[in-house]
Image (spheres, helix red, strand yellow):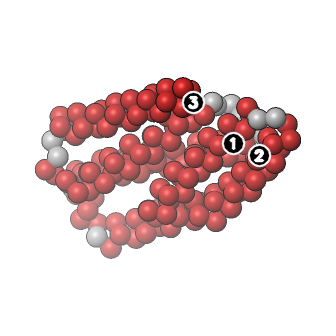
Amino acid sequence: MVSWFAGLFYMVRLFIYFSETENENNEVKSILKKQFQIMQKRLWYIISWPAMILTIIFGIMMLILEPGFLDKSYMHYKLSFVFILVIYHLLCHVLFLQQQQNIVKFSSYQLRIWNEVATLLLVSIVFIIVLQNTLDWVYGSIGFLSIAILLMLGIRIYKKLRTKK
């Protein structure tokens, strides 16, 4: 799971760098794009996809060995977030395929926001497991929204600081 998240975090970071090459001159842009495409391909196929597949296999094995986990409500919430994470991974794959064809559809700002979706999913999954049944939905929802707001504020502050330079 840790490798899967690391791959997703770094992959979207590479998407950001790739999109920022659009502001470079043609020679620099060409060199950087080729390098980022190589890095993306290696990260995606050597780390991210295998880590996701192994995480899912081990998760299914755990549920087969301990089916009682499925009787617990928190496990259903966790599995829902894992399902959303798989969808996020597949959407990242679409972005990967686009960038491999030199297609840039999103700005670096939009991709920075996209990168924080994985952060929210990670925090949610970990908190659900750590707190299990002690987590009241009201407090959980408030915490989730608070983290999302803090991440968005952080992105906006970073953007303002970056544009001042």
Element under disc 2: helix
Q: Amino acid at mark 1?
A: Phe
Question: Based on the displayed image, in which of its 4 quarters is residue 107 positioned?
Answer: top right
**Residue of label 2:** 33
Dot in front, 3 or 1: 3
Give the residue displayed 44% in from the left and 62% down from the top: 1
The answer to whether residue 69 is left or right of residue 86 is left
Residue 116, given in percent of the width and then of the height, sits at 45, 40
Q: Amino acid at mark 3?
A: Lys
Label 1: which residue? 18
Residue topped by disc 3: 165
Q: Count residues near mark 1 (Cα–Cα under 10 Å), then give few for <14, some for 14-19, many for 20+.
A: many
Q: At which x and y percent is residue 127?
A: 26, 51
* Residue appearing at x 47%, y 56% in the figure: 5
State the CA–CA distance, disc 2 to disc 1: 6 Å
Secondary structure of the residue carrying numbered label 3: loop
Label 2–label 1 contact, CB within 8 A: yes
Callout 3–callout 1 Cβ contact below 8 Å: no
Mark 1, secondary structure of its residue = helix
Give the Cα separation between the discs numbered 3 and 1.
20 Å
Q: Seen in the image, is 146 located left or right of residue 155?
A: left
Query: Which of these two is toward me, 42 or 164?
Result: 164
* Image quadrant in which you'd find residue 49: bottom right
